Image (spheres, rainbow, N blue to C red):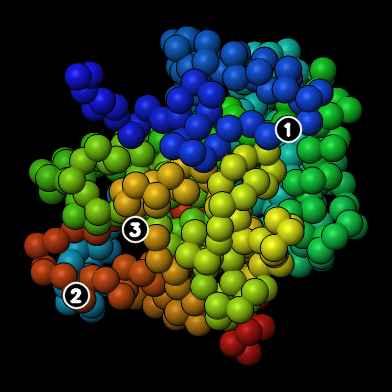
Amino acid sequence: MKKNIKSLKNLPDEKGYYGSFGGRFVPPQLEKPLQEIEKEYLIAKKDPAFQKEYLDLLTNYAGRPSPLYFAKNLTKKLGGAKIYLKREDLNHTGAHKINHCIGEALLAKRMGKTKLLAETGAGQHGVALATAAALLGLKCEIHMGSIDIVKQHPNVIRMKLLGAKVVEVNTGGKCLKDAVDSAFTKFMDEYQTTFFAIGSVVGPHPYPMMVRDFQSIVGKEAKEQILKMENRLPDYIIGCVGGGSNAIGLFNEFLDDPVKLIGVEPAGKGSAVGQHAATITYGSEGIIHGMKTIVLQDEKGQPNPVHSIASGLDYPGVGPIHAYLKDIGRVNYTSVSDDETIEAFLELSKVEGIIPALESSHAVAEAIKLAPTLDKNKIIIVNLSGRGDKDIDYVAKLLKI
Ligand SMILES: *Cc1c(COP(=O)(O)O)cnc(C)c1O
């Protein structure tokens, strides 16, 4: 009998499947351009020159490695497990997204493309991609729902300053899902010269794999750092899950280790349709944006409206790798409400002097619940995926401060 001790770090299979999830569900004319991206990426992945350039830019431009910070005050206040924060908020542009944007931009250049194209919700991916485009001398076009354009005005200005063209999307709910649809359509017209740079571990193969690889630097660093600081592995790792790139970025290096992994979804204002974006918690198997995964959908398979206080988590699908890790029970997925998120946002700001992104505050909230239930010798690492500067106006309005 053949033993099948495959590492979870080496997913997906050659067709882009994670168990029964993933794959490539696209119109026939996109099949070939995506195959080309896959082929070129697999070569680049093994090319030392490509990896060297990628790591060099992450180090000297984005500011990696990001610190693994022992949150002494928060730990003391909660009186349980030790809490460490992986400080992705300290990267250039203020979040983890720069990691995969630099990777995707380098690949685009390697393939001789002259333009980067993407969707954005809150504008975080758009800003990070426009930054990478400016750095590497590529054109950049970002599709964004008109509602998000109004809500996230500072990021629209940033993108424009960075030289990107922002395309307003007025179809459907005028939010992230519609921006993805619009960018996909544009890609079909322009794939000869343009590289579609998806902003999370979502979409058709090879994107979930590629973005996971570019983000896995987060977990590689964290493992080295915690072994150096504590001389052992952590007991728990927590990350918020929108599409799932920051979470898998931190989880990936620990998938084969005896470490408990927790993905936190946005429970929003409640379990009714349209009040949350907790895809794994409430969704069912379906197809969205070129991948088979878990989807929040109606009986006809149309995506449901979603809500989260954190725009970056406001998505009715999830990366196929997370659907699979849920299926095999390797990761425990839970959810945190808008109110708990705001509390965690305020708590970390006051107690540690770190204003976290509302997305990241979901993970912090889960740590705040978990730590006091654990022994003092236990260790939790939380992915602080981004900084909260972008959220301060919203929070100020909400709390009337
Ligand atoms: C975009 C974003 C997220 C959500 O995306 P994932 O792919 O789930 O990581 C989380 N945190 C921050 C700060 C973001 O900008």
The Cα–Cα distance between marks 1 and 3, rounded to whole angstroms, is 30 Å
- What is the three-letter code of the residue carrying label 2? Thr
* Residue in the image at 26% along x and 25% along y: 4
Quadrant the N terminus occupies: top left
* Residue in the image at 26% along x and 71% along y: 370
Residue at image mark 2: 373
Circle 2 SS class: helix
The Cα–Cα distance between marks 3 and 2, rounded to whole angstroms, is 17 Å
Circle 2: is it few (<14), some (14-19), or many (20+) Cα within 10 Å?
Answer: few
The Cα–Cα distance between marks 1 and 2, rounded to whole angstroms, is 46 Å
Residue 332, numbered label: 3
Q: Position of residue 61 (x, y in %)?
A: 53, 32
Circle 1 SS class: loop
Circle 1: is it few (<14), some (14-19), or many (20+) Cα within 10 Å?
Answer: some
- What is the three-letter code of the residue carrying label 3? Asn
Residue at image mark 1: 26
- What is the three-letter code of the residue carrying label 1? Val
* Residue in the image at 50% along x and 82% along y: 339
* Residue in the image at 55% along x and 77% along y: 271
Residue 153 visible in this rendered orientation of the protein: no
